[in-house]
Amino acid sequence: MATFVFPGQGSQRVGMAREIVEASPLGAALFRRASAALSLDLVAVCDSPQVNETEYTQPAIVAISVALAQAFIAATGVEATLLAGHSLGEYSALVVAGAVPFGSALRLVRRRGQLMQEASGDVGAMAAVVQKPLQLETIGRIIAECGVALANHNSPSQVVLSGPRSQLELALDRLRAACPKPRLIAIPLKVSAAFHSDAMHRIEAPFRAALIDEQPSFAADRALRVYSNAHRRAYDGRPSDLLEGLVGQLAASVDWLDAMEQVRGASPPIVEIGPSAPLSRFFKEIGVVVDVVSDIASVGAWRPEERG
């Protein structure tokens, strides 16, 4: 048994599907299913700059993560007792847990990406702020004054800020001036919208409608072992709890540090599954070693008997 964690948007890379579909019959079959569910060639999307457009990024990451997870389970026989995902990664966790069908999840996250982009237009932006240790009180005060949201608390040394680009730039300038020591580093993120901010409230109603359309195929009782970013606990098995968690996640801050603290006491080993491994670096900051499955080669290299 193990704990599976899945990365979210930002973990994509151009060409990330090609190795999986060429090296794994299971992966190739899943991508054929994904392409049929979305009425597009998802492998071709992953081979092009389109993979960095939110509408396509989200289903591509879920498809890759699920393909790798299924290949990993088939190769090792290891199942998860607890699953968690960072924002978008929660959908990968729900699919692998059997709570949301693969096709439904892909359609939902494509719609999610479309709505997120529409919600903040071309003015939304995000930036990671790195500081050791974080001066959270100062950060909180300045971003509140500037109308910027704390989108993610990823680790003891990193938060992500989200909001209109002009207001975000003002907040970053003020933070740099207020925090000369320890040095504060701001890293603009390659995203096209202000995720996990107040701008996302306006898309809750249309996304709820999309969820309700797909809900008859959900198995909410299978979400009992999936951590909810919005609820900051595992789902309770009720269909309404799953629905509200996925709607609430749009605008809510993702407290990944809290998620890691909850996950660290679950079944070892913890395995990060996705096209890249940002979460393993966050876990390392709290003294937790995470195994990484980011391609078919790493699936084949994993040895259960070596993990105790």
Image (tube, rainbow, N blue to C red):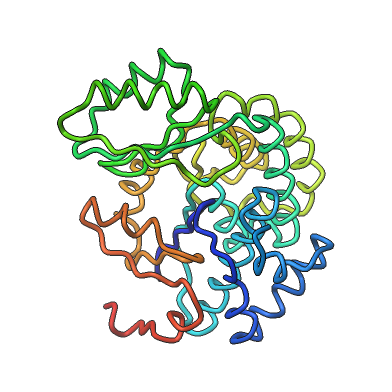
Left or right: 229 as drawn, with respect to 122: left
Left or right: 78 as drawn, with respect to 41: left
Quadrant in the rendering for residue 20: bottom right
Measuring from the top left, give residue 222's x and y in whole percent. 60, 56
Residue positioned 44% across, 16% down in the render? 146
Measuring from the top left, give residue 282's x and y in whole percent. 32, 52
Q: Quadrant of the C terminus?
A: bottom left
In terms of depth relative to the viewer, which is nearer, 12 or 186?
Answer: 186
Left or right: 212 as drawn, with respect to 279: right
Measuring from the top left, give residue 114's x and y in whole percent. 72, 42
Residue positioned 62% across, 40% down in the render? 246
Residue positioned 57% across, 23% down in the render? 198
Residue positioned 63% across, 55% down in the render? 57
Position of 124 relative to 158 (above/below): above
Position of 153 relative to 43 (above/below): above
Measuring from the top left, give residue 195's x and y in whole percent. 56, 36
